[in-house]
Image: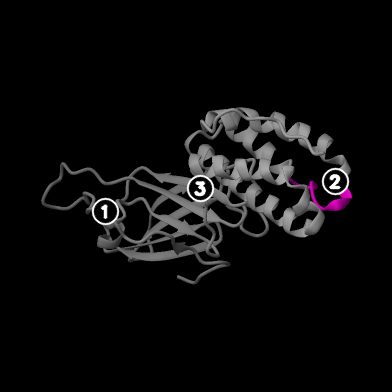
Amino acid sequence: MAFVGRTLAVALALAGGLAACGNGDDESVPAPAMDGRLIAPECGGGYDLEDAQVTLRDESDEIIGTATTTSNRVAPLTAPCVVDFSISEVPEAKFYTIKIGTHAGPAWSAKELAAQDFDPELTLDDAEVTIVDDVDFCSSMSEVEDLFDNVELLNDDPDAWTDQLQSHKADIHGYAAGLLLEEPSSEVALEAITAGDALDGVDGWERANALNADLAPFNDAISDPFKEADCGYWMPTTYS
């Protein structure tokens, strides 16, 4: 089958035991379901992965399963894009190929697909979801507070100060992404995203005198997720 557009890649190494696959010797074994996930750098920009058609074919190029992808599971984060899809029954075949939207995917043997429990995780352009755990999140937030108090760093190297804030923004978004994958409507995750976004524009010496005003919405946004992660008491910070 000709590849169209970007090509999907398998993100995870084959792991796990063989899943049950329907065979002629045991009519009672049900056909397995496929619950897949696709991760891309973004949902738009030529990727067009939300509500996309999923087509599964066998070695004869016959369509043996279809589905539609979900909306972005980590919205309102705009990057990366994470969509899921589910095919209720995957008939027995020697080989399988998949296409999601305009993106042609890999070919699996029956054994390779069963080794993934029929639940493939696919990527486009090496995209990944960086999920930060509670410990990393708390550590990052502690460093954010230290940075806001570190007048010497701001004076000596405002660009480095800005770079560190953007790194911590990525950590905060990683924490939020982890929550959203488990609880797509998590209010804590939405608050964390707001807090991470509040770090934009708080950069360099030109903004130093406005830091107190900039920090007010950040402190409000981070309070609940900071407590939810059991980081301890969040002390609002002011610049002086």
Sequence order check: which comes first, mark 2 or mark 1? Answer: 1
Q: Which of 52 and 112 is in front in this view?
A: 112
Magenta range is: 199-206
The quadrant of the image that shows the C terminus is top right
What's the CA distance linking mark 1 and mark 3? 22 Å
Point 59% across, 52% down: residue: 80
Give the colour scheme shown: one colour
Q: Which of marks 3 and 2 is in front?
A: 2
Q: What residue type is labelled 1?
A: Gly
Q: What element carries label 3?
A: loop
Point 22% across, 53% down: residue: 17
For residue 131, which numbered disc appears in the image? Answer: 3
The quadrant of the image that shows the N terminus is bottom left
From the top left corner, tell me how far across and down residue 11 is, in percent.
43, 60
Q: Is mark 1 on a helix, strand or loop?
A: loop
What's the CA distance linking mark 2 and mark 1? 53 Å
Q: Nearer the viewer, residue 30 or 64?
A: 30
Tell me the crowding category of disc 2: few under 14, some 14 to 19, or many 20 or more residues within 10 angstroms, Cα based. Answer: some
Asked if residue 3 is among those painted magenta in the image, a careful observer would answer no
For residue 208, which numbered disc appears in the image? Answer: 2
Q: Which residue lies furthest to the left in this view?
A: 25
From the top left corner, tell me how far across and down residue 60 is, in percent.
34, 66
In the image, residue 2 above or below residue 200: below
What's the CA distance linking mark 3 and mark 2? 31 Å
The image quadrant that residue 106 belongs to is bottom left
- Residue at image mark 1: 16
Sequence order check: which comes first, mark 1 or mark 3? Answer: 1
